[in-house]
């Protein structure tokens, strides 16, 4: 992931190893990115990100990459699909115990909650793991299986992880 910290949209792009998709043709590359301040005017495209077409978003990103001069040529072969996700940070809202239901609330026998908005001990939202563990928890409980999902990795108790995090945070 590359963040452009000086960008008005606070834009980032993420470049996965290629090919990313099964069947992705040779010579086609994919990347994705996002901006957090979608109502601010861009630095190269003087429009808020939320009002931009895919081409305009790509133009802004190319500007931040220092490729403004090549924009025309790159855009001729690029497809950029914008997607608004106005509620995506809702998963990080502050919460207290009891705000979110347990996967299988007490006494329930035929209905469960899965996904990002149920309560799972120790787990971290905004992850695929959270949804998978909640679904596993639901299935095991409702079917009366004597199984538990794989344990949550607790990196916060690993001195090596803490040391690496400290180094990264302090730019060492
Ligand atoms: C930009 C971005 C980056 C992310 N990066 C990561 C990452 O690096 N690592 C990671 O682990 N997680 C990441 N996540 C989070 C992860 O993608 C999600 O937590 C996970 O996909 C949620 O899975 P889910 O099956 O619970 O819900 P979803 O994948 O949201 O599936 C819900 C499905 O229900 C469908 N649906 C909704 N309403 C209805 C309806 N009424 N009727 C029928 N169908 C309906 C939707 O169309 C959707 O297909 C990222 C998310 C985003 C948005």
Image: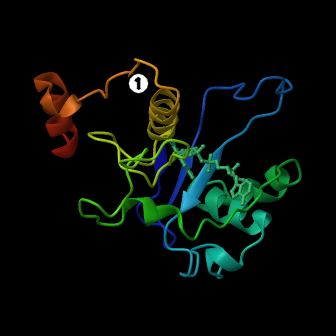
The residue at 44%/39% (across/down) is 130
Residue 126 in percent (x, y) is at: 45, 48
The residue at 35%/48% (across/down) is 106
Q: Does the residue labelled 1 lie within 8 Å of ligand 1?
A: no
Q: 158 and 42: which one is in front?
A: 158
Residue 1 in percent (x, y) is at: 48, 42
170 left or right, relative to 4: left
Vertical order, 149 against 109 (above or below): above
Q: 153 and 147: which one is in front?
A: 147
Residue 39 in percent (x, y) is at: 56, 81
Vertical order, 106 against 71 (above or below): above
Q: In which quarter of the image is residue 110?
A: top right
The residue at 43%/45% (across/down) is 103
Question: Which quarter of the figure is the C terminus placed in?
Answer: top left
The residue at 56%/74% (across/down) is 38
- State the count of labels: 1
């Amino acid at each position: 992931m590359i963040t452009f910290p000086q960008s008005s949209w606070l834009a980032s792009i993420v470049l996965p190893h290629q090919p990313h998709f099964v069947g992705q043709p040779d010579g086609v590359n994919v990347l994705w990115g996002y901006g957090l301040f979608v109502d601010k005017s861009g630095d190269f495209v003087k429009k808020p990100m939320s009002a931009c077409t895919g081409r305009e978003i790509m133009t802004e990103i190319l500007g931040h990459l220092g490729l403004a001069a090549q924009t025309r040529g790159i855009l001729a072969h690029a497809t950029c699909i914008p997607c608004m996700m106005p509620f995506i940070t809702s998963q990080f809202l502050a919460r207290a115990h009891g705000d979110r239901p347990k996967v299988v609330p007490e006494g329930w026998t035929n209905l469960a909650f899965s996904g990002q908005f149920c309560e799972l001990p120790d787990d971290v939202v905004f992850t695929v793991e959270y949804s998978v563990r909640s679904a596993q928890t639901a299935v095991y409980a409702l079917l009366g299986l004597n199984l538990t999902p794989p344990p949550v990795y607790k990196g916060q108790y690993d001195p090596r992880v803490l040391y690496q995090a400290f180094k990264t945070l302090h730019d060492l």
